[in-house]
Amino acid sequence: MNQPLADILQSQRDTIINAFIREASQGNHPFYESMPQEERRERIGTIIAVFVQSLTEGAQLLADAMEEIVHLRVSEGARPDEIQQTLEYLRSALQDTLDATPNLDTTKLLAYNRAIEQNLHAASLATNRAFSEYFTRAQKDLIEREHVIQIQNRLISELSTPVLPVHNRILVMPLVGIIDSQRANQFLERMLLAIGDYQAETIIVDITGVPFVDTAVANHLVQAAHAAMLLGADCVLVGIRPEVAQSLVGLGVDISTMVTRSDLQAGIEYALRRQGLAVDRIDI
């Protein structure tokens, strides 16, 4: 039914491309203006070729093509209105070409314009649907990525502040690296949760791997000890190296309320004695 229209448009392909480029230039379309001329003509020519083919094979062909164009153009940073504007340029270029075509009576011209509008309407609906599906999928992917990031952050937090049960109701928390405010808060949260989960009586905090302890870190450790005490647990600080001890003295930090031991072994022995247990050497 639309074969005569398709033949006219096919024969006027270059004219339509030039009219499209002219419309895009007047519309100040940055995407087409920034594109090399040869690539610009090729892309526009592809759209026109699909449109002409859709006149004889059905509007769905153009709709499917516009969905592919949406995915391509979005990846290039295009906005929805820019892609819809492409259809407006195509409409104007097609109408200008038909108006300039000789030997077309009013009846044929109206019928051809109606066929063009039907196909462009289907393409516009497909474009909006493709954008909606794209952004819905993008939003879903974003939510999933945020969920993965939250899981990763939790795992990193757990790995950076591990809790090691070494005996019934005795826990060890080794700290390694620089302790800033965020990590100190993570440490306190992990410690309190662990005390509740394991019904711990003693929690041993080993700072052997902490390069330096300033006033803020020391205060966090004191607060942790007080918080543990409120939960019925004893907090033991071990692994204070000489330079760290000297730094704490120089800063005037009072940790006298905390139980301290020289190293992890001494801390574990202290925790066992609190339970009426002891570590004995066994000769084998």
Image (cartoon, helix red, strand yellow):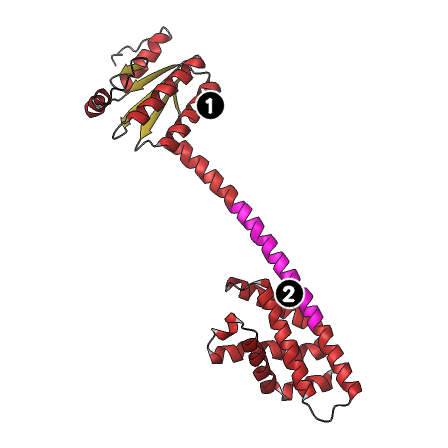
Q: Secondary structure at mark 2?
A: helix
* Residue 17 x/y as whole percent: 58, 82
Residue drawn at 61 percent across, 70 percent down:
85
The answer to whether residue 20 is above or below residue 216 is: below
Dominant secondary structure of the residues highlighted in magenta in the image:
helix
Q: Secondary structure at mark 1?
A: helix
**Magenta part of the protein: which range?**
120-145
Q: Amino acid at mark 2?
A: Thr
* Residue 13 x/y as whole percent: 61, 85
* Residue 210 x/y as whole percent: 28, 29
Residue drawn at 46 percent across, 16 percent down:
199
Q: Is tag 2's residue or tag 1's residue first in the polypeptide sequence? A: 2
Quote the CA–CA distance across marks 2 and 1: 52 Å
Q: Which residue is mark 1?
A: 193
Residue drawn at 44 percent across, 36 percent down:
155
* Residue 223 x/y as whole percent: 38, 20
Return the mark for residue 127.
2
Work out which quarter of the rendered image holds the C terminus and state it.
top left
The single residue placed furthest to the top in the displayed view is: 276
Return the mark for residue 244.
none
